[in-house]
Image (cartoon, rainbow, N blue to C red):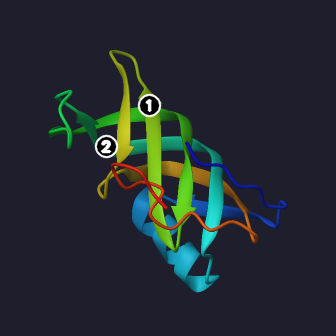
């Protein structure tokens, strides 16, 4: 196990418009503001299209299965981290017939509008914190 602390920096709110891709928009905002390390606190809104992946096996590295579809869904939650400028996020959705989620992929397209909230972690170094195995 490894831990570290950081003071809380600025909060960034990203407004997403109809047809925006959630992941691409977060990546664009991270690049535009030169964010290195941050926490994704949440999101709200709706999507017309979803694309996620979930783990399908218990061996390391696990196999992934990709889920995508075109159905209107509400965004229930979005959380994750920005590690050395890379976005790693998990999302959950709900609709009239299903509730689902997983690792956010390109292709989650906003229906009406959305918002994503991040807080910067200026003293953190989360480089490689999503790597399998021990990190130094």
Q: Is residue 21 visible?
A: no
**What is the number of the mark on residue 93?**
1
Q: Is residue 40 left or right of residue 9?
A: left
Residue 131 vs residue 24, the one in the foreground: 131
Q: Is residue 32 left or right of residue 61?
A: right
Q: Is residue 59 left or right of residue 132?
A: left
**What is the number of the mark on residue 51?**
none
Residue 48 x %, y %: 35, 44
Residue 39 location, quadrant: bottom right
Residue 75 x %, y %: 51, 36
Q: Is residue 100 visible?
A: yes
Residue 4 x %, y %: 70, 55
Residue 94 vs residue 105, the one in the foreground: 105
Residue 45 location, quadrant: top right
Q: Secondary structure at mark 2?
A: strand
**Among the two numbered marks 1 and 2 on one chain, the one whose residue lies closer to the N terminus:** 2
Q: Residue at x 47, y 71 (%)?
A: 27
* Spatial CA span between label 1 and label 2: 9 Å
Which residue is at the far front?
A: 136
Residue 126 vs residue 22, the one in the foreground: 126
Q: Residue at x 51, y 68 (%)?
A: 127
Residue 50 location, quadrant: top left
**What is the number of the mark on residue 50?**
2
Disc 1 residue crowd, few under 14, some 14–19, many 20+, Cα 10 Å: many
Q: Residue at x 33, y 15 (%)?
A: 97
Which residue is at the far top?
A: 97
Q: Secondary structure at mark 1?
A: strand
Q: Are marks 1 and 2 in contact (CB under 8 Å)?
A: yes
């Amino acid at each position: 196990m490894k831990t570290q602390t950081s003071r809380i920096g600025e909060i960034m709110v990203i407004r997403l418009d109809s047809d925006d891709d959630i992941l691409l928009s977060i990546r664009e905002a991270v690049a535009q503001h030169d964010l290195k390390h941050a926490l994704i606190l949440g999101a709200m809104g709706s999507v017309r299209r979803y694309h996620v992946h979930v783990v399908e096996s218990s061996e390391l590295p696990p196999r992934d299965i990709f889920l995508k579809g075109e159905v209107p869904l509400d965004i229930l939650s979005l959380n994750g981290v920005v590690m050395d400028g890379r976005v790693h996020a998990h999302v959950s959705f709900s609709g009239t017939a299903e509730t689902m989620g997983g690792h956010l992929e390109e292709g989650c397209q906003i229906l009406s509008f959305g918002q994503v909230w991040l807080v910067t972690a200026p003293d953190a170094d989360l480089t490689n914190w999503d790597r399998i195995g021990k990190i130094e």
